[in-house]
Amino acid sequence: MLLREDGDAVVAIGQASHAWVSGQLARAWAWPVPEPREELCLAAEQHDVGMAEWDLAPDVHPGTGRPLQFFEVPRPVHVELWSHAAEKLLTQSRHAALLVSLHGTGLYERFPPREPEHQELVRAHLAAQRALQDRLAEEVGAAREDLRTAQRLLAAWDDLSLSLCFGRDRDVPDVPGPGGAPVALALRGTTLDPWPFAAGEVALRAEGRRLAGRAAGRDELRAMLDAAPHVPLRWTLRPA
């Protein structure tokens, strides 16, 4: 879950809703992407599938009385959630499951844990995921270079979606460009430079819940989330 400030309240956006925006970006993308494209788009849309159940009943941040955001989840819980993310897609698409696993390990490679007491836990998680990736890559016949490109694209769509949901500007480096060379994207508000889409503008949507109060515990937070008004979120991306 992530929280977007809204006056004296916050809009709580589930990880699955943010990931939906990533999927919309993927399907609108005009720069070259590795095949199979549909499986890549599915992985973008489902990349946070491991967090969906957590978002139904998140823990409370003791200092704010609001839901823990995805980057505040305790490391052992975060590892456990990501350990089961790819398997949730196995009966839908092995290729998409492979890409979701790669996205998860890529996050730990980009943002390695700082807590010494969790180093071994993360190493074991990464080893298990890489073994799964090797097996699935062989099963679906995925080329390593295509997988690396897909992993970079998933990271870019994830970053863009998160920035839109938070309402923050962002520079997104190392995006596979039209000729294969890395390109840096600059998101400013709802403008993007350079422009990677075929359409002149791209409409995106998600959904959140507006939380005006603060909870003392998990049960109270669950009741607040159940009663919170739903908020439609809309963006229209345009070239800078």
Image (cartoon, rainbow, N blue to C red):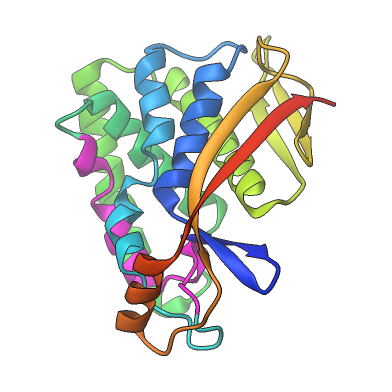
Q: Is residue 16 visible?
A: yes
- Relative depth, front residue between 240 and 121: 240
Q: Which residues are magenta?
A: 66-89
The C terminus appears in which quarter of the rendering?
Answer: top right
The residue lying furthest to the left in this view is 91
Number of on-image labels: 0
Q: Is residue 120 visible?
A: no
Task: Name which residue lies at 55% across and 27% down.
Answer: 25
- Relative depth, front residue between 195 and 20: 20
Task: Name which residue lies at 33% across and 73% down.
Answer: 222
**Residue 172 shown left or right of residue 49 in the figure:** right
Relative image position of residue 32 (x, y in whole percent): 57, 11
- Relative depth, front residue between 51 and 32: 51
Does the magenta run of residues contain 20? Answer: no
Relative image position of residue 233 (x, y in whole percent): 57, 44
Task: Name which residue lies at 52% across and 80% down.
Answer: 213
**Residue 192 shown left or right of residue 104 in the figure:** right
- Look at the picture and state if 68 lies above or below 156: below
**Residue 148 shown left or right of residue 157 in the figure:** left
